Each structure stands twice: as C-alpha cells, then as structure tokens.
Image (cartoon, rainbow, N blue to C red):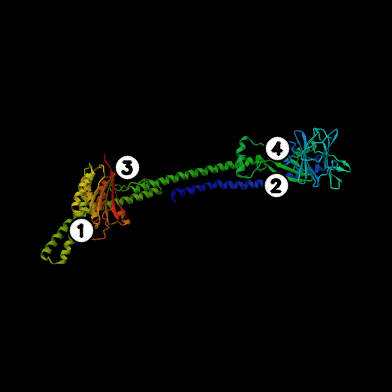
Amino acid sequence: MKLRWQISIIALLSLSFPLLAWYAFKQLNQTYQEGMVVAAQKQADVIKQSVVQYANNNPAGIEGLVYEQLTSGEIDGNDAEWQTLAWHVVDYKLRFKIAQINDQWRMLIEGKDNSPQMATDNSLDRIVLALADQHSIKKLTIARQAVGQVFTPSVSSALQAYWHETAGGYQVEVALPVQQLSRIGLVLIDHNQALTPLTHGHTQGQQITLHPLFEASSSWQSFLESIKPSDGQVVIKDHKSRLLYQTTPAKQTLKDSDWLSQFLYELVFDQDATDESFFYGQQIIHELPFGKIETTLVQADAQIALMQTFLRVMGMLLLAALLLLGGSFLYAALLVWRIKKLNHSLQNALDDQGQIHTHLPAINSSDEIGDLSRGMSQLLGRINEYTAYLKQLGGRLSHEMKTPISIVHTSLEVLHMKQPEDEFISRALNANNRLKFILNQLSALSKLKQIIAETEVEVFEINGFLKELTEAYRINHPVIQFESYEGEIHMKASKDLLAQMLDKLIQNALDYIGPDDHILIRTAKDNKTNNFLLTVTNSGSQIAPQHLGQLFDSLTSFRKEKSEQPHLGLGLYIVKLICDFHQSEITAINLNKPKSVQFRIKGKISN
C-alpha cells in the first residue's frame, strides 16, 4: 500500500471522534428521555385520579351518545365515508353510527336478519326512529324494501334515505329531518317466519325510550383546563376512541431558527419520530371507566437546549476532525511529493553523457528525508569517484603496461628464435599478444570517446549512404540485404561514426548467423513523430531474454563460443555511445517468425 493511502487511512480515523461524541450524546439523551417518561407518568397519574374523582361527582358530563363529524358524502347507500367512524351497538340485531355534516344529522343503521321477506306489507321489517329536540318529538318509520331510495308516503317528501341489502341483513343511510337534535330512540321490528314481530332497540315495554346525545359540559371543560399541565394537553375519549373533551394544546416556544435543531434531533436521536415523538412531547394513555385519557407533556425547550449543546460540541469536534484530516492529506501529499522528487532525481542522476549528479532535493532538510537525501548524495559521490577512476583505468593500464609488455614481448621473441620448438615459449608469446591486444582496445576506447565528443556533424540523406555501405559489405558477405524507404530521410549526423556503428552491428550479426541465414538492413519513416527507424536483423539465433537489458553495457559479453580473437564486450557499447551522441535510441528484441534478433535505432529526422 502506498504511503499516501497509509497516512490517509490513519487520518480518516480522526472522524471517529464525532461518532463517539454522537454515541455519548445518544446515550445521554436516552437517559434524559427515560427520566422524562417517569416524570410524565407520575404527572399523568395525578391527572387521571382527578378526572376519575370529578367523573364520579359529575356523571352527566360524560353521558350520552357520542356523534362524530363527516367531511363529505351523499345519501347513496355507499358507506365508504363512514368507515372511520365507530358503531353504537344497541343489541345483537341492531347497531348504528351518527354524525354531523354541515350542521345536518346523518345516521347509518345496520340490521341483522336472514329470514325471507313476506308478501304483505304488514309483515315487512321496519325501522322506527324517534327524534326529539327541545320542543317536540318526531317519529319516522322506514319499511324494508328493494335496494334504492326510500319512499315513505306517510312521511314528508323531504326525507332522504337509501336502503341497501347486505349478506347478513340490510343497511340504511338516512338524513335526519331535525335541526336541533338532542335525543334519539331507535327500534327494529323483525317479522319471523311465524309472522310474530320481534322488537329490538331502545324500548321499554311497548314504548320507545329516548337516549340523549352527548354534549360537552362547560363545567367539565373548565375543570380539565384547570388541571392540564402548562406545557401539555389533556384529551378524553370514549372506549371507541371518539373524542369527548380536548383542552387547548400547549403553545410551542420554538422559534423559526429552531427548525434545524428540530430536524437534526429527529435525524440523529429519534429516527422513528412522529409528531408525538420526544421532541414534541411525552404522551401517556390511561384507561378510564368510561373511556381513556391521553396526557401529552411538551418539553421542546429542553430538547432544543440539548440539541443546541450537541450541535456546538459536534461542530467543534467535526471542525477539529476536518482540520486534522485536511492537514493529514496535505502532509501526505507534501511527503509523497518530496519522496517522488527524490526518487525522480535518483533515477536521472546518471545523464546521457554518463555524468553522475550528486546534488539531490531536500539535501538541506533536517528531517529523515533530508538524512536520506544526504546519504544518497554521499553514495552517488563515491560512485562518481569510482566511476571516474574506472573510466581512466583503461588508459592508465594501457600507458603503464605498454613498456613492461613490450619488454616481455621482445624477450619472448628472442627466446622463441633461439628455441623455436619450445611449446611453453610459444604459449607465453601468444598470451602476451592477447594481453597487448586487450590494452590496445582499452586505449582505443578512451581515444574513441574523445573523438566522438569532438566529431562534427552534417545533414545528409541516409538511404543513399547506407546503400553504398551495404554494397561494400556484400562483396565479402552476400547474405547482407538492404531495403530502403521509398522517400528520402535526412538526418544530422557524422558519416564516419554512423559507418563505424553499422560495422559493429554487422560484425556482431555475422558472428551469429549460419550458412542459410541472412542479415537485413532496413530504413523506415514515421511521419507522425517525425522519426526515422533503422533496423539490422539477423536470422538464425536469439538473445536470452535476461540478457537483453545488459547488451549495451561496457565490458559485457555473452558469447558461449571462445575464439582466438578475444571479445571484450565493447562493440555494442561503442554502438550505444554513437547512438547517444546522435540523440538516438537503440534497443534489441527477439523475433519469432522467423527466429531472429533485431537491433532498432530510432532518431529524429532533420529537415
């Protein structure tokens, strides 16, 4: 893993500080909420006991049939708008719903009856309604009929009702023709198969009993307002969750600027929050003999204070973490940049002329990278000194050893003349000749470097020049072929050095070909990059892949067969020197079809 990613991972761990703070605040909030629940529960218990006691002393304030409100709906037998309203169950045969819509009274009556209809009117099932206001009582009779609008001649044509048969009986939706309804009585007359009428509903003897509708008592409302918490609300409902009493809700003290705290509280602490969440208040529900009481305690101010404290702490921790993270990224980038710069300088410490540059970046820095730079600079200095020594070694050896070798050579020749048949003298003389040849090669290499550096160049067309050289080579070696680029290729170079370079490549190729192999010299041109390509390919052999990168090193030879003429590994090294002088690039590759070795020289074209 790269250094920048290692430092980045460590820096990212700094983001764990806000997470730990969030966890700590969440635990603190949980403890706080549990304390709020206990306190709210105790306060709700006191309110419940007060309500039960007041109900015992004032039972009239909670008696009566509770009606609800409808928002819309026509008298069409469709009970979809009634689905959310609760039933008043009279007995197992009869139940109803009562509601108001735009100050008009509506009822949905459901009767249970599976017996077949009789043929005479006197045997039809009937629903009897007794409706009372402050001044009078009205009685409505609705006989069982086919599905549709109810038509009752005995009643005013203003009656709106709809009869609907069901699987277990029937439903009737009716609009009550009374404005100030205060009491209601409902009776179902059921004719069985024996034609014996059975009466169900609000009856006592043969009379219909009237039951009052629930009306909220002002004394009850005042009592509840007096005991409700200043920061809460009390709601009383019957057993079917129909609203009886509701106090005015506590006023929120939230400011417009608190919306962020409210949003963050539900996001961070109360993900499943609704409007009855901890932020909005604690809701406690108690069962009552006549229904249930819901007590809500709103504590938004405390929640706002907690959230604002959390925001401040989290903001400071997050800012510190982000600054640390940003600083770590910048430091990692700077550190990586310094190391890359040092690495780049090391890779380019040896230039194309063979000079070693010992001055590296950050050499004056006092940190570990500076120590590394100084150490590498000292190492490069020593290598430079040793390289300079090696460069001069050939010339020095050649100069210093010429005289003793000449003396040895002269002495051996004299001995050989006196004792021409002595085998040991002949071996010594041959070995001395080889040593003399090696010294001459080293001396020639030193002179060649100086000659290359001082050579003058000119612009000429290389296809014609190479063609002349190839024709000269073919006199002694017909296996050499030349393929020229169709157009002209001009380059700025030294003809002498170029000829010497080609001599080395041809001589090297001749040492590795067989009687059926050939050597191909070819030129090509790349118009896109404005480069020329000169290739020398010899078939019949290949270079070991592990040696390809070392072919052009000085004093390096991979020849397996030994010959009388010593090979010092300087031929391809001289080729590399000539290419470097002409700012060209040389590479060697193996080709498989056919099996061969190709030397590629790529350089710039001169206009």
Q: Is residue 107 visible?
A: no
* Nearer-N-terminus badge (1/4): 4
Q: Residue at x 17, y 61 (%)?
A: 430
Residue 571 versus residue 303 in the image, above or below: below
Q: Which mark is residue 529?
A: 3
Q: Residue at x 23, y 44 (%)?
A: 463
Q: Residues within 10 Å of mark 3 (few under 14, many from 20)?
A: few
Q: Which mark is residue 38?
A: 2
Instruction: Name the secondary structure under disc 3.
Output: loop
> Which residue is outermost to the bottom?
422
Q: Position of residue 396 (x, y in %)?
A: 21, 53
Which amino acid, mark 3? Thr
Where does label 4 land, which residue? Answer: 250
225, 517: nearer the viewer: 517
Where does label 1 land, which residue? Answer: 565
Horizontally, residue 368 falls left or right of residue 168, namely left
395, 458: nearer the viewer: 458
Label 1, label 4: how far apart the Cα atoms are: 112 Å
Instruction: Name the secondary structure under disc 2.
Output: helix
> Which residue is outermost to the left?
418
Q: Residues within 10 Å of mark 1 (few under 14, many from 20)?
A: few
* Nearer-N-terminus badge (2/4): 2
Label 1, label 2: how far apart the Cα atoms are: 107 Å
